[in-house]
Image (cartoon, rainbow, N blue to C red):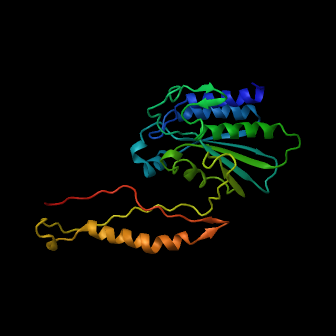
Amino acid sequence: MSNPTRQVVDILMDLIRVSTVSPPGENYLELVDYLDRLLTGFGLNTRIIDVPKSVIRKYYPEYAEYPPRYILLAELCNVRDRRIHLNAHYDVVPGGDGWLVTEPFKPVLINDRVYGRGASDDKGGVTTLVLLAKQLSELKGFSDCVEFSFTPDEEIGGLTGVGYLINIIHRPDYAVVVEPTGGLDTVWIGSMGVLQVDVVVRGGLPAHASQPWYGINAFEDGITIAHSLGSELKPRIEGRRFMGETATVVLGGNYEGGWRCT
């Protein structure tokens, strides 16, 4: 195994061994400290950002008392006219069951493949950015501005990770998010953004099942709303295109009913 390949494997395995599971959010500072040591060793300027408790409590109150959230921001900037920002998240989903060759946070190398939780999503991405930073730092005459961020909580929505970061840094000219979606040769254009809507339908007037006409059935009203969203809103949204890509709408999710009388 060549030295560059060995370095990729070593860093990736080190990252996987730190079980940064989200939810709820574990061992974040340990991993951020590790990345900080690597990047400062490559000559980058770094800053560890402690996400305020008030922000965590606002978006994820159930995790407010867990260990803090940290963001690592690093830069290699010799000019200030244009800036490209590269991001990867370091949290992973829980280990889960059914592992055949190893345990989730005990990475192994088999036939040139690393197995472990996050090897792809997204500690593979984190490793890629770390080694890109090293390569750029070794370029003679490098005269651009590249910014790297390593953020938590992507697996629960990212509001205390990227969502917080974008409001406290200068807006970059370009941004690339490193994710394994679509394979190594795929670049997704994400400029259209995402909108998530939670719909609550209130009946307000219960009735016995033998006399439903005395009540207001929130479930039936919900069906009417869902039909309208599917037949009217969905075709309008999916008719929009940008840079050859089509907007999408996904209807569904969790359904919960309130009190009923039978």
Residue in view at x 72 percent, y 58 percent: 173
Q: Quadrant of the N terminus?
A: top right
In the image, taking residue 193 as reference, residue 43 lies left or right, namely right
* Residue 89 versus residue 253 in the image, above or below: above
| Residue that sits furthest to the right in the current view | 141
Image coordinates of residue 127 in percent, x first then y, are 67, 36
Image coordinates of residue 179 in percent, x first then y, are 62, 46
* Residue 182 versus residue 99 in the image, above or below: below
Residue in view at x 53 percent, y 28 percent: 105
Q: Judge by depth and name the residue closer to the eye, 211 or 165.
A: 211
Image coordinates of residue 132 in percent, x first then y, are 74, 40
In the image, taking residue 213 as reference, residue 77 lies left or right, namely right
* Residue 166 versus residue 6 in the image, above or below: below
Image coordinates of residue 162 in percent, x first then y, are 58, 50
The number of discs equals 0
Q: Quadrant of residue 242?
A: bottom right
Q: Quadrant of the C terminus?
A: bottom left
